[in-house]
Image: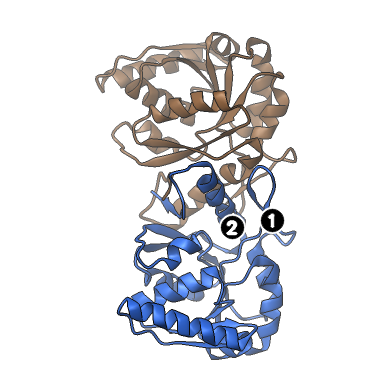
Chain colours: A blue, B brown
């Protein structure tokens, strides 16, 4: 499978690239608005993986070029860039491309982090509204701490919640998630169930902030 | 400690009564609007616990009578009865009584369960607005499946998130939670952080509905 990580130079993109690079044979396309930055990141990930004995195929491209080449396009960008990013790559997507959103909207106040639910209903719904009709959208990889994901010395047992209205696309993303050691994908229904998934991320940060012995938290349903 | 479980004949009240009855020496007061129902539930819990070799002190009272006698008052009622219940017992509460809300507001549609966030900001905020000034309010015990909690043959490793603006009251509730075998209380800050905690409960139900091998789910942060 060819996976494009748009915004793949960022924290969560880096974590997914390193994990897929080590644990699977997928071909990874790091996307960025700046193609030079994308190429540098791809080289850094290859070098990092090489130090772990993993021979990964990773290339860097401008976002639209990465999306054009991919079977699965992960929108690993901040929520406030999500719609821009989808629009920038829209004409490179077709019905065979699976679009994946891990994006979460948060705001911070004096008490902690809070889920900033968009008027559309969820951050995922913003992406659904911006994408071309017919391109399936799946939500996944929301509640993963970028630090722990990027640290290849860290083992974990985390769940990732997968939602979307296209069952075939969900099955593809579920398999991609299951390819990462220690990550368990769980079905959580359709796009309408996105808000409660997205709201877990600020909660994880609040728990980590308030409990000295906990950091880089994921979640496990048991 | 004397703990009143208002609405203690319901699912979550039953679960907490059985767990505290087995795992601790706390005196438990089952509250109900109907005192006869409360007494019957108390007797049923004692009988159940006796079959597990536990000798628990549990009595049944009308809600206000239970609240009057208690150090800690748990509002184990549905969200739509929360304000009524607080108002009904308000003149029995004082600054030494800790009020605890495990209540969550949910609605169901064709996609699944959703967090029904009140205009006040959270269900806990509704209780905070309804209680007498000076009585401390703590949120805890939201994300626990009543079935698993009530089944004394079930072992679990679940977290419960504790929030509130009164640190002394939070410390008391944290200790009560830690008294239940397998339950780990985690601090999640102040009352303003309630919505993301309350929103986890519909998510747990959706995950259980969509994954055949998972049921009676709690959550663990790790």
Q: Secondary structure at mark 1?
A: loop
Residue A89 in percent (x, y) is at 65, 84
Horizontal relation, residue B131 to residue A150: left or right: right
Please say whether residue B43 is visible from this viewpoint. Answer: yes
Pointer 2 residue:
A198
Residue B169 in percent (x, y) is at 56, 24
Q: Earlier in the sequence, mark 1 or mark 2?
A: 1
Horizontal relation, residue A190 to residue A86: left or right: left
Chain at numbered mark 2? A
| A80 vs B41: above or below | below
Q: Which mark is residue A132?
A: none
| A51 vs B179: above or below | below
Residue A188 in percent (x, y) is at 50, 59
Residue B6 in percent (x, y) is at 55, 20
At 41% across and 83% down in the image, what residue appears? Answer: A46
To which quarter of the image does residue B139 belong?
top right
Q: Name the foreground residue: A26 vs B81.
A: A26
Pointer 1 residue:
A117
């Amino acid at each position: 499978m060819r996976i494009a990580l748009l915004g793949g130079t960022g924290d969560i993109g880096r974590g997914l690239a390193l994990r897929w690079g080590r644990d699977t044979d997928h071909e990874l396309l790091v996307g960025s608005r700046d193609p030079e930055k994308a190429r540098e990141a791809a080289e850094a990930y290859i070098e990092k993986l090489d130090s772990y004995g993993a021979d990964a195929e990773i290339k860097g491209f401008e976002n639209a070029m990465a999306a054009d080449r991919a079977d699965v396009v992960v929108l690993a960008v901040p929520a406030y860039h999500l719609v821009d990013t989808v629009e920038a790559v829209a004409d490179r997507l077709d019905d065979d491309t699976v679009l994946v959103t891990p994006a979460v909207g948060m705001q911070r106040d004096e008490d902690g982090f809070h889920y900033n639910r968009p008027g559309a209903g969820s951050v995922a719904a913003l992406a659904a509204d911006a994408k071309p009709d017919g391109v399936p959208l799946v939500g996944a990889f929301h509640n993963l701490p970028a630090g722990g994901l990027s640290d290849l010395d860290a083992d974990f047992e985390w769940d990732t919640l997968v939602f979307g209205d296209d069952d075939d696309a969900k099955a593809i993303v579920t398999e991609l998630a299951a390819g990462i050691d220690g990550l368990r994908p769980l079905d959580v229904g359709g796009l309408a169930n996105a808000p409660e998934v997205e709201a877990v991320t600020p909660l994880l940060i609040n728990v980590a902030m308030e409990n000295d012995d906990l950091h880089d938290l994921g979640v496990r349903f048991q």
